[in-house]
Amino acid sequence: MKLLRFALGIATLATSSSYLSSCAPSFQGEYVDPNKVEILDDRWNDSDARLTAEDMIGSALKKAWLANFASENKGKKPFVLVGDFENRTDEHIDTKALFEAVRNELINSGRIRFLDGDAREKVLKEYQYQGSGMVKKDEVKGPGKQRGADFFLYGAISSMSAQLEGKKRVTYQVEMRLTNIESGEIEWTEIKKIAKGFKRSGAKF
């Protein structure tokens, strides 16, 4: 009797699993080209970020501030510290990723250097540890040799939208600027606008 109940239980479980498998939605995935520009919905996406980063990088390397700084400082390459990037939209946007994309390309250009502001607290703790006597004297790293930043890189993103009878237009505006830390002067600024239009037949947004 116990064997019969066990067999019936196994059969029921198998039938349930088969039923759930048949009802479960199928899933298909594929790799896509990360450089392909696509509009998937009416929200900020990675294509918007990439197009913005490309324009910001080109502007930062071509505008006069860079040549002016080099001529005034005997060919020195400026040190930049990343500041705040304000998200003024009602969307959750990874603004840090946008800053990182711009920063990486500017570093790789070999013309601009960046300081790691996020690591400063950790570096300070490491100084304290290395000065505690736990590290070989000839290998101790101490304060007084870090580079000083010449500029802060700031930014902001905002958006505006309008819609009427199934049509919608979303415009994003991204602004970046470099502020001279010594003088407080804004020496480079750029604005990138991205406008996207949408049409939804038979329904409103």
Image: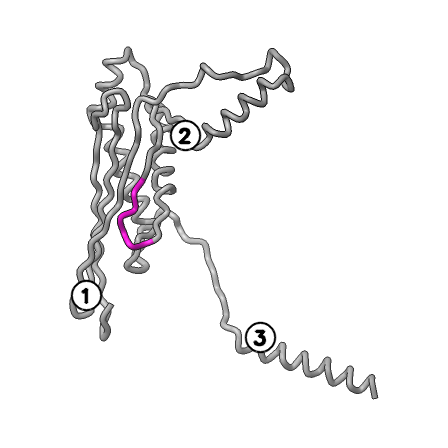
Which stretch appears magenta? 85-91
The C terminus sits in image quarter? bottom left
Measure the alpha-carbon separation of dots 1 and 3: 40 Å
Residue 187 sits in quarter: top left
Which one is in front, 92 or 192? 92
Instruction: State yes or no: residue 56 in magenta.
Output: no
Q: Disc 1 marks which residue?
A: 167
**Residue 178 percent coordinates (x, y):** 26, 29
Q: Disc 3 marks which residue?
A: 21
Q: Disc 2 marks which residue?
A: 117
Identify which amino acid the numbered label 3 is placed on. Ser
Q: Nearer the viewer, mark 1 or mark 3?
A: 1
Measure the alpha-carbon separation of dots 2 and 1: 44 Å
Identify which amino acid the numbered label 1 is placed on. Lys
Does the CB distance between marks 1 and 3 fall below 8 Å?
no
Identify which amino acid the numbered label 2 is placed on. Gly
Q: Secondary structure at mark 3?
A: helix
Crowding at mark 2 (Cα within 10 Å: few <14, some 14-19, many 20+): few
